[in-house]
Amino acid sequence: MNEIELGSSGLRTAPIGFGCSALLGRSGRADSLRALDEAWDEGVRFFDTARSYGYGESEALLGEFLRGRRDRAVIATKFGIVPAPQSPWKQAAKSVARKIVSAAPSARTVLRKGAAAQFTEGQFTIPVLQQSIETSLRKLGTEYVDLLFLHSAPASVLHQEDLLEAMGRLVDQGKVRVAGLSAEPDVVALAVERKVEPLGAMQFPCNLFNLCGVIGFPAQTGGDCVLIANHPFGGVDRVHECREKLQALAASPELDISLRDKLHRLDDPTLADVVLNVILRDTGIHVVIPAMMRIEHIQANVRALKSSRFNSEEIMQIRKMFLAASPRHQSVSAGG
């Protein structure tokens, strides 16, 4: 894949990233490493993780995988959600939970509620920042991270000048190349409008259910800010709904008949092609980050950006129709 410049950050990478939320979370070690290997072989070099991912262990696995590859990778991590210490029995429980979900996907919602108790959210203090970045660097096995995000931050964080100044000092010290905000679109909109320093990167949900980031943030930031879209399929539980939206669109007489024909057979590669290109192509968003743990999904996502079946006019048609139905602000979980 061709690399692009990430705003004025000096960073370069392919426009698709690997979302690490499932590493050692809903996927075990072997499956996690297999997915990382496939993504790397396909040219993916951007890896988006967090202190809380994998119950606090995703960073360590990513660091292990990137050993000897660090200088070719872009690493983004986050702080603000603190994972509980993992005892041996909790590790065993995770393995059991993965088997339950594999056998009965409907159990995912119940198990997610139990998993939520393993985290403490909203920890935006200077001590947590300092401890978190040192832990991240140690687990990742690196002297710096390329991007450090406030994780699922509320708007009130934008008024914490001491915390923002502390993030700026991490940039000055070389431990972080770019400080950023990972939040709901309405919070990101406030940060962009106010040009909050030192935040030079924004991560936000962007998908067929909410495309407001496509029309607002690139124009407001003038191309300097790094813009990263996550949850492109709306999250694991909304992929089916995403597919239904596109199937309904394929039957719409408002679309050109040739485009409806292309959408008629909505297999996984076509779904990825439409979704990822609606978010990225000609929008000013730099990177899109799916959580892709299956080999066929990784391949489909990369192929969508390498050799799309849809021309720019067709992507614009689809985007225009979804934008017309997209709310200005809609709550979608950020940072995963």
Image: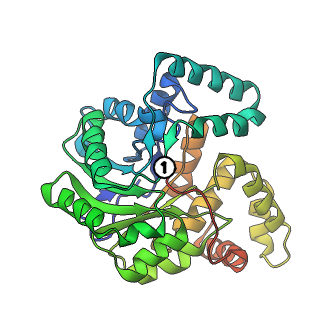
- 89 in relation to 157, above or below: above
Give the residue pinned by disc 1. 121
Q: Name which residue lies at 68% across and 77% down.
A: 317
- 20 in relation to 165, above or below: above
Q: Name which residue lies at 77% across and 76% down.
A: 256
50 and 302: which one is in front? 50
- 117 in relation to 311, above or below: above
What amino acid does circle 1 point to?
A: Glu
Query: Quick one: label 1, few (<14), some, or many (20+) residues within 10 Å?
Result: some
Residue 82 image-quadrant placement:
top left
- 280 in relation to 290, above or below: below
Q: How is the image coloured?
A: rainbow
62 and 299: which one is in front? 62
**Residue 157 % position (x, y):** 40, 66
Residue 38 can be seen, yes or no: no
Residue 166 image-quadrant placement:
bottom left
Q: Name which residue lies at 52% across and 57% down.
A: 305
Q: Name which residue lies at 24% across and 33% down.
A: 68
Q: Secondary structure at mark 1?
A: loop
Q: Say whether residue 172 is left or right of residue 137.
A: left
**Residue 99 % position (x, y):** 66, 22
Residue 316 can be seen, yes or no: yes
97 and 281: which one is in front? 97
**Residue 24 % position (x, y):** 49, 30
Q: Say whether residue 227 is left or right of residue 293.
A: left
Residue 63 image-quadrant placement:
top left
